Image (tube, rainbow, N blue to C red):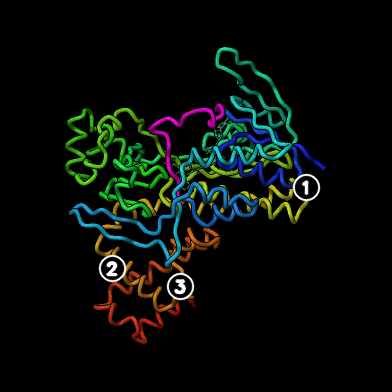
Amino acid sequence: MNKNITILGAGLVGSLLAIYLNKRGYNINIYERRGDMRNEKITAGRSINLALSDRGWKGLRSVGIEDEIRKIAIPMQARYVHNEDGSVSKQPYGKEGQAIYSVSRGELNKKLMSLVEENSGVKIHFNHFCNHVDLNNKTLSFSSGPVDSRQNSPVSYEVLFGADGAFSSLRYSMQFLDRFDYSQKFIEHGYKELTIPAGENGEWQLEKNFLHIWPRHSFMLIALPNQDGSFTCTLFFPFEGEPSFSSLKNENDVEQFFAKFFPDVIALMPSYKDDFFRNPASSLIYIKCYPWSLGDSACLIGDAAHAIVPFFGQGMNAGFEDCTVLDELLNENGDEWGKIFSSFQHSRKDNTDAICDLALNNFIEMRDLVADPHFLRKKKIEKMIMADFPDRYISPYQMVSFSDIPYVEALDKGKQINQVLEQLTRHENPETRLDSPEIQSLIQTILFG
Ligand code: FAD
């Protein structure tokens, strides 16, 4: 039985995976490119808040660390939409009591690393940048240690997981294999982080338990609450065009842009102009590849296998679900890694492709449709259907965020539901006619048929 496992990357997924595998008695070595972030301050402009939802919680619960993470998570029960005309509206994410949770990526990662190191038999080797995976000889080469004393030091592996993110070194080596499919796409938008600090007495300057959105058609600003009373804001914005990162060249441009599109934010964000020029504009990519594994020796997991855009808040959640699925396969197959990897990639690939599509679609919904009258009408009808069929109707958003229904089913069902809602919006006054036999039969057939 193979008891030694190597993981590339001590990010969110690599760390959680290590906890899962260590509980089964494996010895684990994790090689992480960066230094130990627990000793370093998270750089401003790079802090990122993540929305943690049911699939993520399930991944944490199965290894008994859910309660520990809940301590650093803030529930957000609805979208709080700040419209262009200054009006606001609240769009609940699900039923009463359902919420997604804001967590700082850095804090979560630090916590997971500490939980990893609580276990014996796991070692995280920091400052180890893997620059080559030799798949034939099963060795890894690293640039390790401080930059001026780096040396290549090959390390052998028996079973290797690539949890090293969107620019995975394991995946790079696999790209040279025959019949390995790979595609990547940078979208037109990037993102920049800004901050709404806590008020004078440490209070939240916006309502706390919401994900705030300022949808502005071709771009949007969002704000997620932090535990210290601040909000981490992200401006999703095109790189080129008018307006865009490249068109805002100086403080005056930024000032005019905010005055036009986010006037209510200016008073809350005193350093927005400095932050705008200090913080980087980062790009957004999605990546698809297949297969994810090589025989019984190596497998990609998390963003390394399926990086997606962040607009459904599911990248990490999908990566944590990878760990849950892998764990179930270990229950069924013992140490037969070839079988496990093959079933794993087979069961996950369609689902991660589906969440990739759902995330791309959700960007349009978030930046544009949440303020669009036709979309709002569909949402209103959907709400009425939910009220009429509380036990039977689950919206696509709920399927993705508040269940572990396979993503591929959520995507298919979402398309069907959209058709029904489109049909219903064409009726003169669906609000009063939802109980007509014609509409009831439409709902029954398409939604539950
Ligand atoms: P990563 O978090 O990228 O971790 C990879 C690790 O590997 C890192 O520690 C890295 O230093 C290390 N590494 C990389 N290369 C090497 C190498 N060659 N050698 C050694 N180590 C290496 N997801 C959600 O679920 N909800 C959200 O709300 C959400 N919001 C997001 C917002 C933004 C702006 C972005 C960019 C992403 C968001 N995501 C969200 C996605 C989420 O951040 C990722 O899906 C998640 O971080 C993936 O985890 P991972 O461990 O697979 O990869």
Please say if 196 is above or below 440. Answer: above
The residue drawn where x is 41% and y is 49% is: 311
Which region shows up in magenta?
34-51
Residue designated by label 1: 335
- Label 3 within 8 A of ligand 1 by Cβ: no
Q: Are marks 2 and 3 in contact (CB under 8 Å)?
A: no
Residue designated by label 2: 377
Toward the top, the furthest residue is: 148
Q: Nearer the viewer, residue 400 or 116?
A: 116
Query: Which comes sooner in the sequence, label 2 or label 1?
Result: 1
Toward the front, the furthest residue is: 201
Amino acid carrying label 2: it is Arg
Would you call the spot at circle 3 few (<14 residues within 10 Å), some (14-19), or many (20 or more)?
Answer: some
Query: Which comes sooner in the sequence, label 2 or label 3?
Result: 2
Residue 173 shown left or right of residue 188 in the figure: right
The residue drawn where x is 49% and y is 78% is: 449
Separation (CA) of disc 2 from disc 3: 18 Å
Amino acid carrying label 1: it is Asp
Would you call the spot at circle 1 few (<14 residues within 10 Å), some (14-19), or many (20 or more)?
Answer: some
Residue designated by label 3: 393
Please say if 427 is above or below 123. Answer: below
Amino acid carrying label 3: it is Tyr
The residue drawn where x is 62% and y is 37% is: 162
Determine whether the residue tagged by mark 1 lies in a helix, strand or loop.
loop
Would you call the spot at circle 2 few (<14 residues within 10 Å), some (14-19), or many (20 or more)?
Answer: some
Determine whether the residue tagged by mark 2 lies in a helix, strand or loop.
helix
